[in-house]
Image: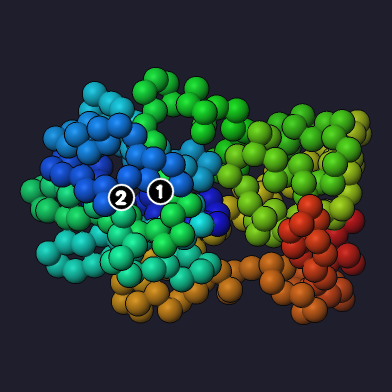
């Protein structure tokens, strides 16, 4: 499953091609992905100008003139590919390799940019867990987007807000951070990374960082800062790998380089002054990586 920074990198890669472009044709090459395509999917997009390409949690959103808004999820294995007269580009470096097999090209958007250049933006998805749906009304009431928590990007998520979200919760801190109704788009990898940066154990009760007093206040502030920075660092790395990608054909693999704990079981903790080692435990059926020496 792509994580939020991967989705944001895809959005930034598609933005220059799609924003302001006019959709001249849409090919949906099968009736469904995870869900059936909306009725009149192609007809309702053809001829429209794309006014904005956005993101909410792990959903890409495409505003078109006069509506409807397109909501797109990459699922397990979805990716976009841009084909222009000059060549090909796949925006985003993913943790797992992405298919370029044209048998799995399920949707093709033919677009003409504001400057007049033609491109094909192709959605490829071997496992077909991705989807594309229309939001007819305000996007926040769409079933996929309603009830999503605060974004972990930007300055909204501060210590006080994080403490209010965690207050009274008896579940492990890691589980509460993965609850999409509280914080939207934060996934397994980045929760482990953020907890390590904040020196907080994934096993501690979530509510402990919301107790009265200076100690808990410092913990919630540290964790909010760690969440924001781990996500923004990954987006920045994705952005730079995106530029390099065009020269190096995707062999960069920035994810392996930038994780401090994820997938590093048994390795020494890289925090200055810490003599601990990274352990892997399983919480709610998913791997958690942490250092019990510096994360309390
Ligand atoms: Zn450590």
Which element carries disc 1, helix, strand or loop? loop
Please state, as top left, top right, bottom left or bottom right, where the N terminus lies in the image. Answer: bottom right
Give percent across and percent down for residue 288: 76, 61
Look at mark 2 in the image and give the residue it sits on.
Answer: 30
Count of numbered labels shown in the rendering? 2
Q: Do labels 1 and 2 touch, CB within 8 Å?
A: yes
Can residue 62 be seen?
Answer: yes
- Quadrant of the rendered image containing residue 25: top left
From what the image shows, is residue 35 above or below residue 295? Answer: above
> Residue furthest toward the front?
31
What residue appears at the point 53 percent right and 41 percent down from the top-left corner? 57
Question: Badge 1 is on which residue?
Answer: 33
Residue 177 percent across, percent down from the top left: 72, 44
Is residue 46 or residue 164 the one in the foreground?
Answer: 46
Residue toward you, 247 or 97: 97
User: In the image shown, does 112 or 38 lie closer to the viewer?
Assistant: 38
Q: Position of residue 259 (x, y in %)?
A: 64, 68
Label 1 – label 2 distance at C-alpha: 8 Å
**What residue sits 81% from the left and 56% below the top?**
283
Residue positioned 80% across, 79% down in the render: 266
Q: Position of residue 52 (x, y in %)?
A: 31, 36
Quadrant of the image containing the C terminus:
bottom right
């Amino acid at each position: 499953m792509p994580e939020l920074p991967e989705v944001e990198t895809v959005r930034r890669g598609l933005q220059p091609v799609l924003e302001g472009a006019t959709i001249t044709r849409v090919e949906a090459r099968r009736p469904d992905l995870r869900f059936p395509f909306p009725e009149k999917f192609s007809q309702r997009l053809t001829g429209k100008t794309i006014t904005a390409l956005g993101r909410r949690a792990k959903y890409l959103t495409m505003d078109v003139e006069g509506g409807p808004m397109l909501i797109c999820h990459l699922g397990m294995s979805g990716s976009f590919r841009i084909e222009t007269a000059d060549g090909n580009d796949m925006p985003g470096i993913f943790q797992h390799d992405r298919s370029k097999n044209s048998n799995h090209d399920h949707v093709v958007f033919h677009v003409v940019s504001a400057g007049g250049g033609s491109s094909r933006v192709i959605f490829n998805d071997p496992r077909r867990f991705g989807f594309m749906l229309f939001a007819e009304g305000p996007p926040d009431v769409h079933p996929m987007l309603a009830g999503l928590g605060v974004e972990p990007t930007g300055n909204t998520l501060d210590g006080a807000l994080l403490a209010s979200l965690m207050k009274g919760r008896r579940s492990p801190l890691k589980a509460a951070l993965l609850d999409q109704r509280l914080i939207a788009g934060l996934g397994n990898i980045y929760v482990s990374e953020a907890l390590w940066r904040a020196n907080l154990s994934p096993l501690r009760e979530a509510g402990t960082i919301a107790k009265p007093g200076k100690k808990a206040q410092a913990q919630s502030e540290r964790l909010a800062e760690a969440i924001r920075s781990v996500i923004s660092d990954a987006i920045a790395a994705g952005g730079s790998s995106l530029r390099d990608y065009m020269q190096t054909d995707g062999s960069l693999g920035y994810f392996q380089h930038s994780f401090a704990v994820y997938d590093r079981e048994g390795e020494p903790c890289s925090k200055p002054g810490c003599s601990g080692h990274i352990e892997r435990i399983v919480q709610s059926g998913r791997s958690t990586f942490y250092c019990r020496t510096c994360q309390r």
